[in-house]
Image (spheres, helix red, strand yellow):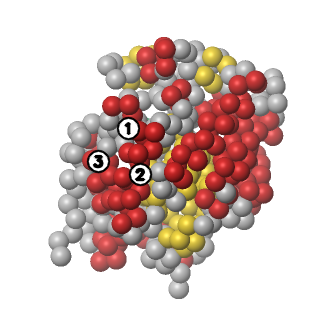
Amino acid sequence: MTDLFSPLRLGAIELANRVVMSPLTRCRAGTGNVPTDLMAEYYRQRASAGLIITEATPVCPEGHGYPRTPGIYTAEQISGWKKITQAVHAAGGRIVIQLWHVGRISHPDLQPNGVLPVAPSALRPAGQVFTGQEMKDFVTPRALESSEIPGLIASYAQAARNAMAAGFDGVEVHAGNGYLLDQFLRSSSNQRTDAYGGSKENRARLLLEVLDGVCAAIGSERVGVRLSPVTPFNDLHDEHPQETFEYVTAQLNRFSLAFLDLLQGMGGAPKEQWIPFDYERLRVLYTGKLIRNNGYDFASAQEAITTGAADAIAFGRLLLANPDLVERFRRGAPLNAPDYEKLYTGEEKGYTDYPFLAG
Ligand code: 8OZ
């Protein structure tokens, strides 16, 4: 019987089991947003998961919206990531990098030369951003010119090539959680009147062109994508999420991607509060491999795999606190609790010091 411990092939990537590590921003990169040896230790510890999806990683300097997030656009960053992919591979794991651009979820203090962040439309998100020194209100971003779109797509394609040079098994294009590609997809942040705004077909165009560029660069069998149809994180919503995301999902089929990583629900909010959305419909529409995520425990993950509702399950909080999560699942062992105070701070504390099972 196929279960959570069964191997799985995602495009060109062979996984030893169906436990996937969700992308988790941890804000521990070094000077120049270069990945560190401590980050290599953190990922190495978690290499028994079938697949690691790294923390969100900006594809260009303008893609940053948080301090100390690692990039994948300089030679030093590529060298730093190389140490991480080598450590994970030496431990028998597989690792893909999440390609990111925050769009309007940034601030001039975090932008090169203090410029305005870019977005589909000049609409200021509600909320505040941590600039490294203090919390500041979001600003009204600058709407991207149509003429800038090819350069943006080229940044994603180059980042994907850089990822291959760094030894990754593939990439995940981050199109969720209220960041740039999601700002184009969902209606509340996209009031463009060109070919990239308005209808769902137009709002999906940038994501599909980015996937075209990234697949041409490294091959679709090493490319995945993350969607989060209803998360309100970063002040985003869609008027008709079911229609928007059924369209996007159907379009994804033509790429023969390695996987679709579907973030269900709304962050840590309890299920009863989730905006209604028919995820099963996407499972039926999508012809490729599906990773489902958010709030699964061992029992619900096993059920999702054995019933065929998912091909793999991604775990964030559980893998953060339990580097040996697969072994704990196998043995029915108790789980460590995450230290939420140390999510984005604390260096090795709450990062590489979670205990492994004895023996
Ligand atoms: C939490 C804090 C900072 C970034 C996401 C990249 O939600 C993130 C993120 C989450 O996708």
Q: Work out whether 220 lies above or below 39.
A: below
Q: Secondary structure at mark 3?
A: helix
Quadrant in the rendering for residue 275: top right
Q: Which mark is residue 82?
A: 2
Residue 315 percent location from the top left of the image: 43, 58
Residue type pointed to by label 3: Asp
Tell me the kind of residue under disc 1. Answer: Val
Image quadrant containing the C terminus: bottom left
Q: Are marks 2 and 1 in contact (CB under 8 Å)?
A: no
- Relative to 106, residue 326 above or below: below
Q: CA distance from mark 3 to mark 1?
A: 10 Å
N-terminal of the two: label 2 or label 1?
1
Q: Earlier in the sequence, mark 3 or mark 2?
A: 3
Please tell me which residue lies in front, 123 or 252: 252
Q: Residue at x 36, y 42 (%)?
A: 35
Q: Element under label 1? A: loop
Residue 352 lies, in percent from the top left, at 24, 52
Mark 3 — residue? 37
Q: Secondary structure at mark 2?
A: helix
Mark 2 to mark 1 CA distance (whole Å):
11 Å
| Quadrant position of residue 278 | bottom right
Q: CA distance from mark 3 to mark 2?
A: 11 Å
**Which label lies toward us, 3 or 2?**
2
Nearer to the camera, 299 or 196: 196
The quarter holding residue 45 reads: bottom left
